[in-house]
Image (tube, rainbow, N blue to C red):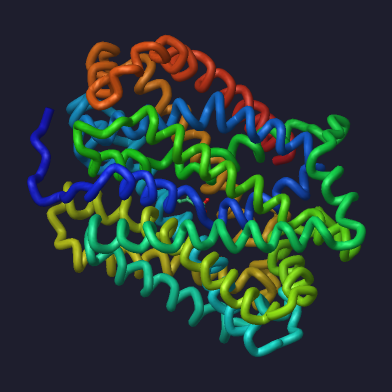
Amino acid sequence: MATAPCDRGEWGSRAGFILAAAGSAIGLGNIWRFPYTTGQNGGAAFLLIYLVCVILLGVPVMIAELTIGRHSRRNPVGAFEAIRPGSRWRIVGFLGVLTGVCILSYYSVIAGVTVGYIFKTVAHSGASYAAFTANPLLMIPLMLLFLALTVLVVQGGVRNGIERWSKILMPLLMLLMVLLIVRSVTLEGAGRGLSFYFKPDFSKVTGKTFLDALGQAFFSLSLGMGAMITYGSYLSKKDDIGTSALCVSFFDTLIAVMAGLLIFPALFAAGMDPAAGPGLVFEVLPVIFARLPGGTLIGAAFFLLLAVAALTSTISLLEVVTAWLVDEKSILRRRAVWIVAAIAFAFGLPSALSLGAVERLGDLPGIGMSFFGFMDWLFGNVMLAVGAVFISIFFGWVWDRRASRAEIEQGCPSYRKCAPAVTYLLKFFCPIAIGIVLFFLFRDLVAAG
Ligand code: PFF
């Protein structure tokens, strides 16, 4: 195995790592993407399938990624290279890096909207979500601002930048969500929202539901593109990979489930459409804020904390690509972050303009999606699922089982008990289950094309 560069940095403490990894996982995926995807897929049945995906696919893939990262102490490309030198496995790392830039590009667009909504709430502006996103003079500067903020934090390096922020602000977001949930579920007519969210109607389940649930699980847990390989590479050998993976998955899922609990009761109380799509959260939340004493302040605080949650996620997206440039291309960290952000900005422009500003980008011919929607579908769902298949095959079949097991058991001796189950899931269940979903997707695409 190649030796690790000595100045890569390590997490300051175990809690610091868990919070940073949870910071990567918890973000717009939980609070913006999860509710509208659940709404589009009929509610409770989707929630159930999603939870199964998190437990049977998400947790094992997270263990695999963290282990690969800590063992190799490298970015995704270097990690595969270190464990299987000279093989084609490094391509999986490259795909991850590419996926990272592409997700960062459109993710920053919605993150920018979140920042805009802080001011919109304070200014009591009645403009709709559609009107907001159709304004390029808002969308582009906000995206740029968000990317710049991300760069400034990542420049600071692992411990000072990433860890410090996550520690303070994540718990605050959770607290505010609890408060808002209490208001949402006590609104008149909230009951219908609760049954939509908790009473499954399996007649709504289609092949697309499975792809959406699986993609959402990987997106939300930051899996399939090497973000957790990169974060795992900063773990010390004393750290407990198994417990960390469980903790991060648990908190991430808790926040997503809470976001649903926050959105659906208020949505039904206001007589809105659960299948409204990406604007859902931005349309429903103001309804709750309007019915709270001090709603303006609470609303602004919520969007501020959501922006911070998004920031701890964009940090990890940028970090994957930066770590690759720093480790493999010997580019200075300070320079690398700006290069990546500039590329993300260029890719992000068409996404920012596709939400109402430029009609042609809003409905791509032959695809039936906006440019933004297409990027999210391709990179946020499909590519993460593809990455996860390769990572599980690598862990289950390619990497020497004794080596991977020894790596996990360092710092987590009790892993011995669950090792057979995790190995089984990574060897058979993950590749087959994800493979089947991707196969049907491919078949549908061919049939449609
Ligand atoms: N998990 C983040 C969210 O839920 O918002 C998004 C994300 C971050 C996806 C990092 C993938 C990733 F590598």
Residue nearest the viewer, comparing 390 with 68:
68
Can residue 111 be seen in this snapshot? yes
User: Which corner quadrant of the image does residue 438 belong to?
Assistant: top right
On screen, residue 260 versus residue 203, left or right, reads left
Quadrant location, the C terminus:
top right
Which percent across, then down, holds residue 25? 47, 48
Residue 181's x, y, as percent?
71, 57
Tell me the quadrant of the picture where the N terminus can be found.
top left
Indicate the quadrant where residue 51 lies. top right
User: In this orientation, which residue lies closer to the viewer: 337 or 124?
Assistant: 124
Residue at 74% from the left image edge and 39% from the top image edge: 448
Task: Say whether residue 81 is left or right of residue 286.
Answer: left
Q: Which residue appears at 83% of the width and 47% of the height?
A: 194
Q: Residue at x 8, y 35 (%)?
A: 3
Q: Is residue 321 above or below residue 48?
A: below
Q: Residue at x 52, y 38 (%)?
A: 250
Total marks placed: 0
Rendered view: 445 above or below 259: above
Which residue occupies the extreme bottom position in the image?
A: 123
Q: Is residue 182 above or below residue 135?
A: above
Report x, y in % for residue 56.
Answer: 55, 24
Q: Is residue 24 left or right of residue 198?
A: left
Q: Position of residue 81 (x, y in %)?
A: 21, 32
Regarding residue 95, the answer to whether it shows in the image is no
